[in-house]
Amino acid sequence: MGRLEFRVFGDDLGNSRATLRQGYRVRGHEMRDDLYLLGGDPALVFKLRGASALDLKRHVARDAAFDRWEAVGCVTLPATGADLAATFTGLPPFDPARGHDAEAVVAAFVHAGHRAIPVRKERTQYEADGCLAEITRVSAGPGVTSWTVAIEGEDKAALEDLRQRLGLTAFQNVSYPQWLGALTQRERH
């Protein structure tokens, strides 16, 4: 079935961030670089994690205010085309016998018409009433930075309660692919 997620982006989101910081236990903090490979089927979101693994999440459905996402799989690179094809659907063509490193994977996606968008994330995760919540400072290219607050879990009622406590009910749910797509549309005009 996948997990439910609600995510917002904004320049500040200060009240929601303060509520998380003051009211919930930190689960972890990380800094990482991802490369989103956007194109093809919009329900399939390929992401290169730290130039060492290819990850795929699939958008399953919209459930009220939440998106339902399923983790399809993650393959450590380099990997053969056969290993990639055994884990993922919606891939560009890869030689099944040959090993493919991160550079070759990105080149294949770009050649197939995908956009490769680098995203740097500084993320703090919180345990929040049976849900996972996060505050992330995100950068997607020169001069493009934003905050994002997200909540995720399996219990829709608990997520809705948390969404209300964080003051997020007036916001629209926006996934990373939607946010990045809007940025690239703005750059084109």
Image: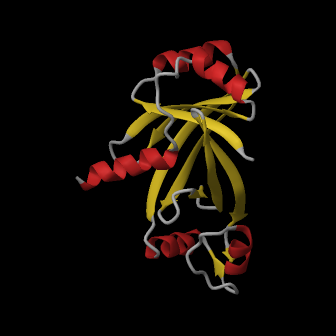
Q: How far across and how far down the image is residue 165, in percent?
A: 60, 15
Q: Quadrant of residue 97?
A: bottom right
Q: For residue 159, what is the image quadrant? A: top right
Residue drawn where x is 58% and y is 46% of the image? 32
Coloration of the structure image = secondary structure
- Which of the pair 108/92 is nearer the observer? 92
Looking at the image, which is closer to me, 130 or 154? 154
Q: Image point 67% across, 38% down: which residue?
A: 4
Tell me if residue 113 comes above or below residue 125 in the rendering: below
Q: Residue at x 53, y 42 (%)?
A: 121
Q: Nearer the viewer, residue 44 or 82?
A: 44
Q: Is residue 52 visible?
A: yes
- Based on the displayed image, in which of its 4 quarters is residue 158 positioned? top right
Q: Residue 133 vs residue 119: left or right?
A: right
> Residue 145 location, x and y as percent?
40, 38
Q: Residue at x 74, y 35 (%)?
A: 154
